[in-house]
Amino acid sequence: MMNSSCKNVYTVLNYTEKVAISTICVSITPLSLLVNVLILVVIGCSRNLRKHPSYLFMGSLALADTIACSCYTINFLEFHLSESDNLLGKTEYLLKLGGVTMAFTGSVGSLLVMAADRYHAIYKVSTYKVLLTRKRAFMAIVTLWVMAALISFLPLMGWNCQPCESCSSLFPYVDRYYLAFFASLVLVVIVLILVAYALIVWMAHKHEANMSAEHPELARMRVDIHLAKTFSCVMLILLVCWLPVLSFMMTDAVGTKLLTPEKKAFAFCSTLCLLNSGINPLLYTLRCRELRAALKSLVVENNASRTLQATHSHNILTNLAIQT
């Protein structure tokens, strides 16, 4: 079990800060869960969407964000709001931390897969559907989640530390070298996402320039400008939600001892990752016209089914009344 000195090191929030951070989590989590679960239901119920690899990747992102919202909120609040003298044991803590890490790793990894998918859809238009089959997309998702689980549970499998003094200042039992490894990995993934979207905008700009040179008399909508604005918003949100947390992790990983104010700031900044899981569906999924159409169709079918059931029940009651 973690001793009281460790508790004083890691649980640094006072009563007012606990109330504030609880309010933030409780405000974000229900809506995030609702939107992500809704996306999973729509994709799961639509045969047409399940046939397209792109929507399988969106489903992977929604699944990761659903798990992240649930695991993060429960475990984060349990850790920071605990009033007991002893916190979790080493194995239990690393197991719960691994679950949260796996969810966020799966989320960022799904964003990278989606960026790569969009890049190849533009770069290799003629062979895209042949190269990216439903089976290959499914295998890519399985590989992503296996790697996310392996990376996230490395501390539980042995890459950890026992004494409080030699561990991370932000996470009990977590080795600083592992923290540096994880933060660096997430940074690399974010950079790759940035590069993929930058290449997409560049190719769109090149295409628009060629079309304008060939047909200068036509007034065209600048798709490249529209994409640049969209992807700039996407990248800005991704960086705002992840860079503060990663900055604290890297600072801790290089051996700089974080004081209580920095630890409190990290606790509040980490809720931005939770916010990112709620924003992802709005940026990457609900903007898709086909998914919105499938959602509308599902709602219409559900309403029609309820109407039919109500009519059937009314007819049964009417027949019973006549017979009586």
Image (cartoon, grey):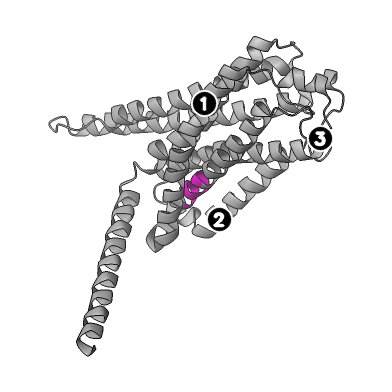
Disc 3: CA contacts within 10 A as few (<14), some (14-19) or many (>=20): some
- Residue at (64%, 36%) from the top-left corner? 75
* Residue at x 61% of width, y 52% of height: 142
- Secondary structure beneath dot 2 equals helix
Label pair 1/2, CB-CB below 8 angstroms: no
Q: Position of residue 312 (x, y in %)?
A: 26, 76
Q: Position of residue 36 (x, y in %)?
A: 45, 45
Q: Which residue is mark 3?
A: 90
Mark 1 to mark 2 CA distance (whole Å): 29 Å
Q: CA distance from mark 3 to mark 1?
A: 26 Å
In the picture, the quarter occupied by the C terminus is: bottom left
Q: CA distance from mark 2 to mark 3?
A: 35 Å
Residue underneath mark 2:
138
Is residue 223 within the magenta segment? no
101 with respect to 279 (left or right):
right
Q: Is residue 235 above or below residue 286?
A: above
Closest to the observer, 139 or 262: 262
What secondary structure do most residues of the magenta stretch adopt? Answer: helix
Q: Quadrant of residue 244?
A: top right
Q: Is residue 127 at all visible to an observer of this figure?
A: no
Taking the view exactly as shown, the residue that stands out farthest to the front is: 324
Q: Tell which circle, 3 or 1, labels the residue nearer the N-terminal end.
A: 3
Residue underneath mark 1? 272
Amino acid type, mark 1? Leu
In contact (CB < 8 Å): disc 3 and disc 1 = no
Q: Residue 85 or 171: which is nearer the viewer?
A: 85
Tag 2 or tag 1, which sits nearer the N-term? 2
The part of the chain drawn in magenta is 56-62
Looking at the rendered structure, the kind of residue marked 3 is: Lys
